[in-house]
Amino acid sequence: MASALRWFLLWVGSGMLPAQGTHLGIRLPLRSGLAGPPLGLRLPRETDEESEEPNRRGSFVEMVDNLRGKSGQGYYVEMTVGSPPQTLNILVDTGSSNFAVGAAPHPFLHRYYQRQLSSTYRDLRKGVYVPYTQGKWEGELGTDLVSIPHGPNVTVRANIAAITESDKFFINGSNWEGILGLAYAEIARPDDSLEPFFDSLVKQTHIPNVFSLQLCGAGFPLNQTEALASVGGSMIIGGIDHSLYTGSLWYTPIRREWYYEVIIVRVEINGQDLKMDCKEVIKWKGIQVRVKG
């Protein structure tokens, strides 16, 4: 189980606005013995020693620009599953906790996970059903070896759901074949005893309990229609790449560890109060927000 106390950061910058259904964030453990700041207090930027600590475990260069995506369809990262490795594009989702991949032919999938070809696959002999705001799937639980080529140089044994049936889940032309849920175990299916991928990664490798997302950070000047145009981004695992932003970071504690639920008093960009009401804020999918008036 992951650390009981974490901080959450909303990372918004010029030119880095998320597509609908996405959001920006950093998952950080609260250091043992340190009291949290009052809600809304702006923490000073990390000292050089603190900011360099994650880099001692390896460079983040390989992780920069490791995401691809399309407007309204989310962002995906390349992952490998099984032995020998099977390469799949996996949708990054902070609003769920299951790691699941297509494991049967589907009209919208160019490739899928073939468990019978993996010598390291272990069947847990348990089914799973997961509904989303839009779409649903069901499948069979197992474990296998998983790695992220443009991520930390590690391989972990993780829980994986092999999707055998789905309805309105996969998207035609989206170029991803599975989903990586990065939220907490409380909302994992079939129950919270199923350890999420990121928790397994932290436990097995001792990588710092931190991931950061920078979305819409790089565009691709392709002569394509808007529906086909891709955008880039970065998922930094184990730290924060300070080259991806300017200024200081703002932190707020997690109110409840299921989705990334935080309390927002108000939202400012470049010193300007956006004066967003509760309904407008809650439109951010995958994150439960409570506005304190």
Image (spheres, rainbow, N blue to C red):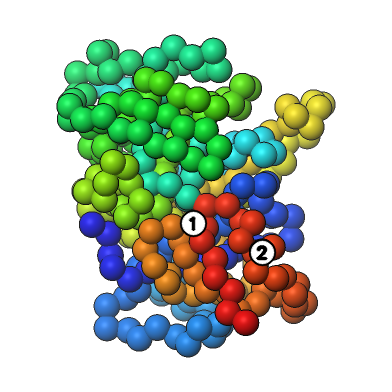
- Residue 108, quarter of picture: top right
Q: Where is residue 80 in the image (x, y as percent from the top left)?
A: 37, 28
- Residue 87, quarter of picture: top left
Q: Is residue 138 above or below residue 4?
A: above
Q: Which of marks 1 and 2 is nearer the N terminus?
A: 1
Q: In this view, does 211 lie to the left or right of 273?
A: left
Q: In this view, does 27 lie to the left or right of 143?
A: right
Q: Where is residue 118 in the image (x, y as percent from the top left)?
A: 25, 18
Query: Label 2: which residue?
Result: 279
Q: Where is residue 181 in the image (x, y as percent from the top left)?
A: 41, 44
Secondary element at image label 2: helix
Q: In this view, does 159 lie to the left or right of 244?
A: left
Identify the residue at image location x=72%, y=41%. Answer: 219
Q: Position of residue 268 (x, y in %)?
A: 70, 75
Numbered disc in front, either 1 or 2 = 2
Q: Is residue 269 above or below residue 74?
A: below
Secondary element at image label 1: strand
- How much space separates mark 1 and mark 2, taking CA atoms? 26 Å
Residue type marked 1: Ser
Q: Is residue 31 left or right of residue 247?
A: left
Q: In this view, does 87 lie above or below 105?
A: below
> Label 2: few (<14), some or many (≥20) within 10 Å?
few
Query: Label 1: which residue?
Result: 212
* Quadrant placement of the N terminus: bottom left
Residue 239: tell me if it is visible: no
Identify the residue at image location x=67%, y=39%. Answer: 72
Residue type marked 2: Lys
Q: Which of 58 and 124 is in front in this view?
A: 124
